[in-house]
Amino acid sequence: MLIAEQEWRFVTAAADALMIEFAAQIDLTINAQVHRLVQLIQTHDGAGIIEVVPSYRSVLVYYDVLNHSEAQVRNSLAPWVSQVLDERESGALQQFQNSGTLHQIQVCYDAEFGLDIVAVADALGGTIEDVIKLHTAPEYHVYTLGFAPRFAYLGDVDERLRLPRHATPRQKVPAGSVAIAGQQTAIYPSVSPGGWQILGRAAHLPELKAGDRVRFIAVSANEFAQLQESQS
Amino acid sequence: MKLATVLEIGRPGLLATLQDYGRFGYQAQGITQGGPIDERAFLWANRLLGNSFNAAQIEITLGGFSATFTRDTLFVVTGAEFPLTLNDQPLKVWRVAQARAGDQLQIGTGDQGLRCYLAVAGGFQATPHLGSVATVMRDALGGLTQDGRPLRSGDRLNAPLLHAHSLVSRRPSSKLHLTLPSRVTLDVIPAAQVSDFSATARELFTNQSYQVTARQDRMGVRIEGESALSDLPGQMISEPLPLGSVQIPTDGQPIVMLNDHQTLGGYPKIGVLSWQARSLLAQLPAGRRVQFRWLELSEAQRQLRQALRFFNVTR
């Protein structure tokens, strides 16, 4: 079912789950539509929605299949999608987008933690300071969580800093590593394998929710050690 | 509720984990559901003991398990038909039995299935993590010590002390017994990106026979057909991944996502297994042949509703 010039559609996802898809792009406005829709669904009861899972451009909705048909769920969700698209036209979505919680996260970019920062600077033809400047400049947006518990995909990385993943992923990326891949950046919540380019280490990892905003603040190794101590 | 130790693990075998029905409501935070791979066998065990559908059990992969009961209790083993003895006396799988303090339970190995479930009256108790005791090793979540570690020798498990039950020989209706046919049909609901696959690919998917491979764990199982599906939909933006999804990565061979699957996936999905098909697949050893068959959403929902009602599952 395609409505409104393919701006969105419903897709059956499982016997008890329905996907709502917006346009297929990793884009801040499209992602804001996703999170606004999630907010609308969660603040209004209807059609036995059990769990809502947002991602880049889609929302997965699990429903109470004992008491609701897929058609009922579609009917109850469609008005919320329309409202989101209306809000985009009226500019209200922009306000919503800027209303997510802002987190400030201190990062130490020393090569001791930023395992790839020297190589990234070389790839850019710049200095480590250039990389830090580019990485700390934007206010990032939490597109979605996934891959591992509390792993948040943040964007958008400055175009000059967009680099591919390593051809061979590391077996063990240290917990707290701050890394980049393409237009995305992230903090590894725990030790795990990973192929992203590691720039530094976060002093702490707040509980990030999709739709939140993040700013990275560069700190020295000394400040980093103090921050870590004050938290333990 | 008064708790007391009921079981001490002797040998855990290849893998024994504590599982309840699963961890729900946290997928938006990237936290997967866990829970029993063979949901049907798990729910039967709880039903046979009069437990809540969500009561925790031990999922035992490939058998080779032993334990000692430390007090009297009713218990049952469901799922794979591994040889089962209590103090060296053979017992039947799927049948509630009485254990006395000191009794030795042995679960052997066999090729009739992959996983069995050991349940006791009242269910095993552990401190829940995010509302569940389901063990997810990869994410270090849940289990006896809330850190995702599997059960090991010497672990002692608690269960509520219940008023003495009389032993009623509850057993499932015979048609629900697990008997693995030599050739299994797995029902697939056309879903997700199914319409982005070519007609040729969709036909090949249900026309050829497939083989379960050894490349499987609690996250997923790779299934291999003689011919790979070709002209696949392109790589897509990652999206939430439901349990039982049949992903087709670039090699054209299916991967079915099981309970510990990652919450987001970027491979196109040709469909999602039905409730019954998931529990069938949960028991298929490597080399077993399977055939996929399309199942309409309405029929899949009818089957799912029937199961949820029968087992009193609520979320």
Image (cartoon, coloured by chain):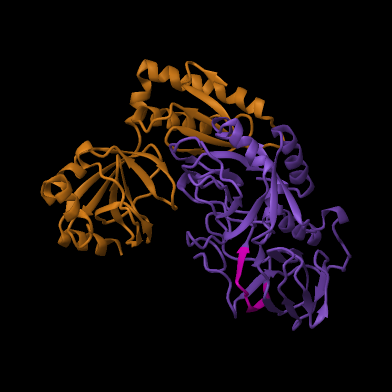
Chain colours: A orange, B purple
Q: Seen from this angle, which residue lies furthest front?
A: B227
Residue range corresponding to the magenta coloring:
B4-18
Determine the residue positioned at 34% across, 24% down.
A94
Whole-percent x and y of residue B300?
Answer: 72, 38
Would you identify the image quadrant in which residue B19 lies? bottom right
Q: In what quadrant of the picture does the C terminus of chain B appear?
A: top right
Q: Which of B150 and B6 is in front in this view?
A: B150
| Residue B226 appears in the figure | yes
Whole-percent x and y of residue A104?
Answer: 26, 46
| Residue A13 appears in the figure | no
Determine the residue positioned at 71% across, 58% down.
B42
Going by the image, does B247 lie left or right of B167? left
Height in image: A33 above or below B228? above
Whole-percent x and y of residue B66?
Answer: 68, 78
Whole-percent x and y of residue B125?
Answer: 64, 66
Determine the residue positioned at 57% across, 47% down.
B254
